[in-house]
Image: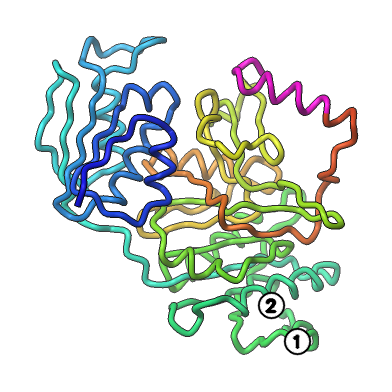
Amino acid sequence: MDQFQVKSSKDLYHLKQSDNSYSEIILDAKLLHQNNLLRYGLKYALWNLPVNGKLTINTNPHLSFGFKKDYIDFWQTSLEIGNSLKNQVSITEFNKKKGIISLVKNQELYKNNGVTLGVVFSGIKEEVEVITIALKSLLSQEGMDEIPHEIVLCGPKGYDLSTFQEKGVDITKVKFLACDFPTSPRIIITIKKNAIINQAKYNIVSISHGRISFPSYYLKELFKRKFDLITPKVIAKKGDKEFPFLDIGLIGSYDIYKTAVKRSISGPFIKKDYLSQFKYRVPYIEGSVTVFNKETCPILYNENVAWGEAEDVEISARAYYDGALLDYFDDLICQTNTMKYDPELNFKAQLKHNILSWLIDRGLN
């Protein structure tokens, strides 16, 4: 096995997509700090190391215990390592003067035992068509004979699943999870999402709204990958055109109880090189599709927070502060079959979008 060095975001993408196992990985934390990407470097490195593999972090030496505008101190790197890697590593070198931390991976926690594919459903007749499309896409997944899995439809008590059977859905392969929750004056959908997480048989738990359908490789890819909390890419189709929809979002701060420090961006504002956009913002999962690893991200939705109250930002923030990696699987392409807005921009809207994108890339908006 070889040594690998991380010096750029290009190296991070390589590790994320790699099936290799390296004997040693060296991270340039000074560079990663500049773009708020240290956790991505640490997690991707860990996932590409075997047990007893070595991880070396070159970071800034210790100067003080204060906060500086232009300097990430040694203690801040050490804090991030402890919080995100926890007991998966042992420290073999801790040199504050030189800014070197060396670690050895001592256990492998990312072992998937199966996938729970959960869909939330309101029970209204207007949703039947899109739920049918969603269930059929989940029932035709590749690898279903080999991969432990379950399909869970979470809807109101007393709902008759024969509605879907009449439309060609094999309901014998769908588990119905009855769950009612308050809808007035606030819609507490977090109760329904937690019901799926709590009842899930497997450690990988995908929760989606009924409007989402899935590619045939979705189950297979989720089962083989390592992650904490992710969203796949979600597109909308209009005629023969495809448009980015709600999947990963970027916000100026996780403190959602005050005015925004930066414009929140998602959909068409998310670039292919999305890691480059983390310099001025923090990520959150938009909520069309949210996928948890219950073993490494054991977190539930806050049932005191309702739909439309940034419930997805709130859970993303708690996951982040607990050391989870919020990631974007842009090669897993799902589709929304209803749209909250018209994704196609007219000339004036496209011009405005281009100007905002230019400002956003430079941290000016």
Residue under label 2: 136
Vertical order, 24 against 21 (above or below)? above
Indicate which disc, 1 or 2, sits on the residue closer to the N terminus.
2
| Residue 359 is one of the magenta-drawn residues | yes
Return the residue at label 1. Answer: 168
Give the numbered dot on residue 53.
none
Amino acid at pointer 1? Gly
Q: 275 and 7: which one is in front?
A: 7
In the structure shown, which secondary structural element does the residue marked by tag 2 occupy?
A: helix
Residue drawn at x 75%, y 86% is 168
Q: Residue visible at 84% across and 72% down?
A: 125
**Residue 73 at x, y = what percent?**
28, 17
What is the crowding at mark 2: few (fewer than 14 residues within 10 Å), some, or many (at least 20)? some
Q: Secondary structure at mark 1?
A: loop
For residue 174, side relative to residue 183 (left or right) = left
* Residue pictured at 37% horizontal, 36% vertical: 39
Of the 4 image quadrants, the one containing the C terminus is top right
Could you tell me residue 170's position as x and y percent?
A: 67, 87
Majority secondary structure of magenta residues: helix
Please state the horizontal and vertical placement of residue 357, each as a whole percent of the image.
70, 25
Residue 26 position by quadrant: top left
- Residue 281 against residue 285 in the figure, above or below: above
Q: Which residues are magenta?
A: 351-365
Quadrant housing residue 209:
bottom right
Tag 1 and tag 2, C-beta contact below 8 Å = yes
Q: Residue at x 47, y 44 (%)?
A: 326
Whether the magenta-drawn stretch holds residue 48 is answered as no
All told, the count of numbered labels is: 2
